[in-house]
Structures are given as structure tokens and as C-alpha cells.
């Protein structure tokens, strides 16, 4: 596995996903080649197809290694990495990617729904990498669809002092209050430092959000940073699943491209509605958990919290990355599964205990949501 450890939390999470798959009982021998500290081609061996069974690649390397990987016949999965040479591969290959368009759109919708902003800004990666560009384009599209005027920071520089000076000028020119999304968390930290130099208050003047939910970064800033939670663990796990598929099917395996969706926004104090919204969601989850054994409805939860159903559903979806109805149903079915595993109660009794109208309704919902019957689930659990 070729991985850029300097990528921080995202790289660690991808590794966690791969380890999760391997530890589930797959007899793999893993070798990590850390970029840029190791010379990839010499670490792998010049004849890739003879030395290894398969590759998981999360970062480009030197051009010689890139060409060798692109020409290899060994099953290869590329994780959120784009390179013209890699894209040309058509056999024994899969691509697992973050839904970067979805991430940009999610950040824009979240900020727009907070309301009250006079401008929306996006700060891309200074190197113009493909994932950053996709996030930017989706952000801009959503802002425009809401009749807003997007502002994109175009003066980024690899020279730290120059980059900060340009950011300060750009931030000062944004109509206030402004809502700003950075391409990733470390970039958001740089925006936060520029705001401090520009004497702009976060979140009153500038609401700020990053991507990746790198807690070491997000919690080290003042105020703590809100962030879109990309599911890098799922990326790693799916990459291992895909490599196993390529092993199994061999030459019959078709090229696939898989996207992993973001899991909502982790709200902290860097966004205007952070604490109130977070409190609302916590209250909703607590109410659902306490009343899951009843025939619970979305409207019932909204009434109990004293807010409109539309507002609660919108906030819940933004923060949790799932619908309120979906969470209620998942919670109720988790109780059903527990009862099936730990008791001998009939379907009718379980339906009555969990607020379903009858056994037939519960059986239908259970099969639809889990892909197996209640009887089969109980048998497999035993």
C-alpha cells in the first residue's frame, strides 16, 4: 500500500478501514510504503507483478513509479487519487473516491441554511488538486442556485507569508457577515489565522467550516472548527473489499468507480448556529432513544422539542448525514434485532413491544431494511 502519511487524519482513517477489513479474517500480508520518506519503486521492487499480489494506492509518487503502477497487471485499487496514467488503466483496477462534489455541496447548503450571510466564500487547496476543484465547483453551484454570489480565493501561494497576506486582503473585502468553506481542515486553520490578523471575529463576522473533521486540528483552534465529516474509514474498507473482488474475479473483473458519501457536518463554535443546533440534535436523539419502543413519528419528536418539523428534519440531515425518519427506524429495528437475539418472543410480541402495528408490518419492514427475514436473522444470530 502506497500512502502519504503527511495527509494526516484522512490517511490514518483510510488505514483504519483497511485494517478493519483485514482483521475480519482475511489472510493478507500488508506492507506500507510511506510517501514521501520511502523511494516507492525500490521499495516495491522493479518487477511489481512478480513481487506483490495487489496494490492499494492513495497517493501519486515519482513519475517512474507512477508509470510502473499504471502498467502493472497486478490488481490495483486507487483511493481518492487522480493521475492521467492511472485513469488509463482498464483491467484489474478499481477507483474508490470521496464524493467531493457532494462534500462541496453539503458545506454550501449547511452554511446557506444557517441564514443571514451577505457573502459566501471558498478557499481552495493552493496546489489546485482535483478533489479541491470538485469541492469548489459544487460549492459555487449551490450558492448560485440559492441566488447567492460566491467568492473564490484565487491568490493562494506556497509561500506561507504571501498566502496569509493575500488571505487577509480577501477576507477583509468579503461583505460581512460572511460564510467561508475551506477545502480541508488545515486550510481552514490557515483561514482562521488570517481572520485573527485581519481582526475579524469568528463566527460573528466570518463563519468558518473545513473538511475531514481532523479533531487534532479542529479542537486546537479558538473557536473550535466545524467540519464536514468525510468517511475516509469507509473509503479504506471499500478499497480492501474491491481488492478482494479483483483477486476473486481475476481477468473477469470489470473496472469500477465507487464514491463514498460524506456523513454530515460536525458542528462546533466556528459556525454561527453551532451550539444551538448541536443542542437541538442532542435533544432529538435523546428523545428518540427514550421513546424508541413506541410508534414514534417525526412530527412527535418535533412537537416534543417545540420546533417545526421542517426545521428539525433539515438540521438533523445536515448534522448527522441521515434523515430523521431513517434514524428513528434504525433505532427501533436495533431493539428488534436485540430481542430476536436474546429472547424467544414471537414476532407478534416483538411488534407490540416496539410499536409496530402488527407482525406482518414488522416482518415486511425488517426484510426491506436488513435484506433478510426475522426468522433467518434469529437463526444466524444463534
Image: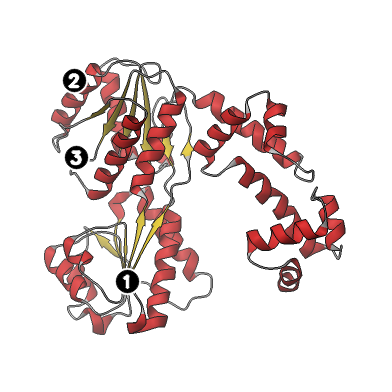
Nearest the camera: 241 or 258?
A: 258
Which residue position is annotated with label 3?
126
Residue 338 in view = no
Which residue position is annotated with label 1?
255
Image mark for residue 229: none
Residue at image x 71%, y 35%? Answer: 287
Q: Residues within 10 Å of mark 2 (few under 14, many from 20)?
A: few
**As displayed, is residue 302 above or below residue 261?**
above
Among numbered discs 3 and 2, the one appearing first in the sequence: 3
Dividing the picture into quadrants, the one containing residue 215 is: top left
Q: Residues within 10 Å of mark 1 (few under 14, many from 20)?
A: some
Which residue position is annotated with label 2?
169
What whole-number distance in Å separates the C-alpha atoms at marks 3 and 2?
A: 16 Å
Dividing the picture into quadrants, the one containing residue 296 is: top right
Residue at image x 25%, y 17%? Answer: 198
Marks 1 and 2: which is nearer the front?
1
Dividing the picture into quadrants, the one containing residue 191 is: top left
Measured as percent of width and height from the top left, residue 112 is found at 41, 27
Label 3 with label 1: CB-CB less than 8 Å: no
Circle 1 SS class: loop
Q: In this rendering, would 91 be left or right of 335?
A: left
Circle 3 SS class: loop
Q: Residues within 10 Å of mark 3 (few under 14, many from 20)?
A: some
Amino acid at each position: 500500500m502506497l500512502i502519504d502519511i503527511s495527509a494526516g487524519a484522512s490517511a490514518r482513517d483510510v488505514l483504519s478501514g483497511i485494517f478493519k477489513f483485514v482483521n475480519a479474517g482475511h489472510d493478507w500480508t500488508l506492507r506500507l510504503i510511506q510517501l514521501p520518506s520511502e523511494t516507492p519503486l525500490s521499495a516495491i521492487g522493479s518487477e511489481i507483478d512478480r513481487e506483490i499480489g495487489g496494490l492499494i494506492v492513495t497517493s501519486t509518487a515519482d513519475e517512474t513509479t507512477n508509470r510502473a503502477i499504471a502498467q502493472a497487471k497486478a490488481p490495483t485499487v486507487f483511493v481518492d487519487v487522480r493521475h492521467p496514467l492511472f485513469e488509463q488503466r482498464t483491467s484489474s483496477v478499481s477507483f474508490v473516491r470521496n464524493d467531493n462534489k457532494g462534500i462541496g455541496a453539503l458545506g454550501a447548503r449547511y452554511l446557506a441554511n444557517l441564514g443571514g450571510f451577505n457573502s459566501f466564500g471558498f478557499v481552495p487547496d493552493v496546489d489546485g488538486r482535483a478533489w479541491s476543484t470538485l469541492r469548489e465547483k459544487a460549492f459555487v453551484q449551490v450558492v448560485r442556485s440559492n441566488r447567492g454570489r460566491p467568492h473564490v480565493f484565487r491568490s493562494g501561494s506556497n509561500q506561507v507569508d504571501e498566502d496569509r497576506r493575500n488571505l487577509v486582503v480577501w477576507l477583509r473585502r468579503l461583505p460581512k457577515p460572511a460564510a467561508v468553506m475551506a477545502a480541508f481542515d488545515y486550510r481552514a486553520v490557515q483561514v482562521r489565522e488570517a481572520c485573527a490578523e485581519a481582526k475579524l471575529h469568528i463566527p460573528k463576522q466570518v463563519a468558518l467550516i473545513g473538511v475531514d473533521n481532523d479533531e487534532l486540528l479542529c479542537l486546537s483552534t479558538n473557536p473550535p472548527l466545524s467540519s464536514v465529516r468525510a468517511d475516509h474509514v469507509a473509503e479504506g474498507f471499500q478499497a480492501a473489499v474491491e481488492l478482494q473482488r479483483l483477486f476473486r474475479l481475476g481477468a473477469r473483473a470489470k473496472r469500477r468507480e465507487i464514491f463514498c458519501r460524506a456523513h454530515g457536518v460536525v458542528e462546533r463554535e466556528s459556525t454561527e448556529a453551532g451550539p444551538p443546533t448541536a443542542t437541538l440534535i442532542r435533544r432529538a436523539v435523546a428523545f428518540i432513544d427514550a421513546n424508541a419502543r413506541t410508534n414514534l413519528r417525526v412530527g412527535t419528536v418535533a412537537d416534543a422539542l417545540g420546533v417545526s418539523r421542517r426545521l428539525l428534519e433539515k438540521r438533523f440531515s445536515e448534522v448527522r448525514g441521515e434523515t430523521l425518519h431513517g434514524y428513528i427506524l434504525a433505532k427501533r429495528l436495533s431493539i428488534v434485532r436485540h430481542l430476536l437475539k436474546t429472547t424467544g418472543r414471537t414476532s407478534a410480541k416483538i411488534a407490540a413491544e416496539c410499536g409496530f402495528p402488527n407482525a406482518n408490518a414488522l416482518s415486511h419492514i425488517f426484510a426491506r431494511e436488513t435484506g433478510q427475514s426475522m426468522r433467518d436473522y434469529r437463526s444466524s444470530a444463534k
